[in-house]
Image: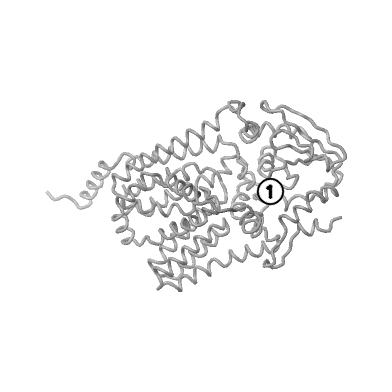
Amino acid sequence: MNTHPASERATSQNTEWQNAPWLARHYGAVLLAVVLIKLAIAWTLPITGDEAYFLIWGQHPDLGYYDHPPMVGWWLSLILPLSEHPLAIRAPGILVSLAPSLAILLLWRREDPVRARLASLIALFVPLFFIAVLTATDTPLILFSLLATGLLWQALRSGAAHWFLLAGLALGLAFLSKYFAVLLGIAFGLHILLFARQHWRGLLLVILGVLPAVAVNLYWNWGHCWYNVMFNIVNRHGDGGFDPGNWLTYALLLIYLFTPWLLWFYARQWRALGAGIRRYRFAVFLSAGLIPLLVFALLAPFKSIGLHWLAAFAPFLLLPALFLSVRALAISAWLSGGLALVHAAILLTIALMPVEWLERHDRYPDAVFYLTPQALAEVVNAYDPDWPVFTRSYSRSAVLAYYAGREVGVFGPGSHYGRQDDLLTDFRALDGANLLYVPVRGELDPGHVEPFFEEVRVRTVEVRGVEWSLAEGHGFDYAAYHEQVLQPVLARYYDFPNWLPKGRCDFTNRYENSL
């Protein structure tokens, strides 16, 4: 009796899945469990300072913001009218953190479904992506970097002009997310010029696709004090130094990111990896991952490299895992899953534990502020809405603004980080007004407020065991504030270098000749 070919294939596939590792056979259940853990973390963790700061961007849609390009602000501006719940705000971060894993699965599921699932799970468990439940500037950067590199891979395989142009447009969206996209653009250019010179016209199309995003960015910066240029190139690099020990720190960061076991199997099975990369023309993915990481290695002795800096480039270096043996993939997936559970336990413990457990710690006031921000927000909301509220920190102001549901500005010089309030608060309009000043750790330094008011009344309240002093400033003296705070701010943060073309700057127009 003859067996039908379709029946033979089905029997072969069933046998393959019966012999597949447990994690591959239960991929859907594992993926669902990870999503539920992410939702639990996102539900329980208080809104962080960076998140709250980006929410301010979302409340004021614009073509750019003080620190970075505008993409995450645009995303949040679409979400906030629907809901301000943490899960809604963090939904893009959760979804994008799954994107590298799902991209690997979709790319390889027809070629080798078992390896596709196991490699997908490894990407799912990588600590950087597993704990990523926040929506930040890296969120759209990761998504559009994946899209741009995937489109370029397709362009190099097909040679079709439209794929190169689409890759450029996606790279432009990555550029409007975060300037690290420039490193991806460098990787694209070097890869084509060094390894695919026959596609040099395609590189021109990639550049053409990026130009609209660059034009939007330059237009906004020209009309807004060159904020991004001043922050990223001028103001934030005054205290750099050379420390070769940072190379070791960076190396440990990479080992933590890619996990020791995966790197071990990469080293043991490098011939199989090399053969697979050549066969499927994955070299562009290696360039997209390795070239930015090599740039960071050159910067490491001069600048501390953050783990999140690697987020847009790490996924491309997980793709070679597809060419590891099934046994190596299964072992790596199990070990990575165990590490992921440790991270989940730590985060959920921090989120759910009573803050009073930290009462004897020196940074207990900081823990009270960031782990139980609602408590201080209730104190602030006891004041009428006509009391403008300020803190001395952009992070504290943003968090307090989210939980109190009212605007909270920055009083004092602040730092070179997060000066979005320079675009929002006009201190001229507050002359003679009464202001509420909230110290960052509860302890009031009279010098921070007394020189700028006719009278300061101090009110002390208890917030989760911390004596928190609030300064009620009556009769704000704009002239004194202008002389002692705004003029030094102008000299420190608005001293434009000669090589920058002269543009518009509302901040300097507002305060340079305001008296």
Residue 121 visible somewhere in the drawing: no
Q: Quadrant of the C terminus?
A: bottom right
The residue nearer to you, when weighing 9 against 379, is 379
Left or right, residue 282 beside residue 188: left
Side (left or right) of 127 relative to 453: left
Instruction: State the image coordinates of residue 223 (x, y, percent, origin top left).
Output: 70, 63
Q: Quadrant of residue 507?
A: bottom right
Number of numbered discs overlaid on the protein picture = 1
Instruction: Locate residue 246, reporting x and y percent.
Output: 50, 49
Residue at position x 25%, y 44% in the image: 14
In the image: residue 340, left or right of residue 273? right
Q: Is residue 117 above or below residue 514?
A: above
In the rendering, at what x and y percent does residue 353 appear?
A: 55, 28
Q: Quadrant of residue 150?
A: bottom left
**Residue situated in front as seen by the camera: 255 or 91:** 255
Residue 341: tell me if it is visible: yes
**Other-residue count near label 1 (Cα within 10 Å), few / some / many at <14 / 14–19 / ≥20:** some
Residue lying at 75% horizontally and 41% vertically, measured from the top left = 390
Element assignment for label 1: loop
Q: Position of residue 43 (x, y in %)?
A: 55, 36
- Which residue, given by chain and number where applicable, does mark 1 sit on? 415
User: In the depicted view, which residue is nearer to us: 166 or 131?
Assistant: 131
Residue at the left extreme?
A: 1
Q: Is residue 115 left or right of residue 365?
A: left
Residue at x-position 79% and y-position 30% = 459
Relative vertical location of residue 459 with respect to residue 203 in this rendering, above or below = above
**Which colour assignment does the render follow?**
one colour
Disc 1 marks which amino acid? Ser
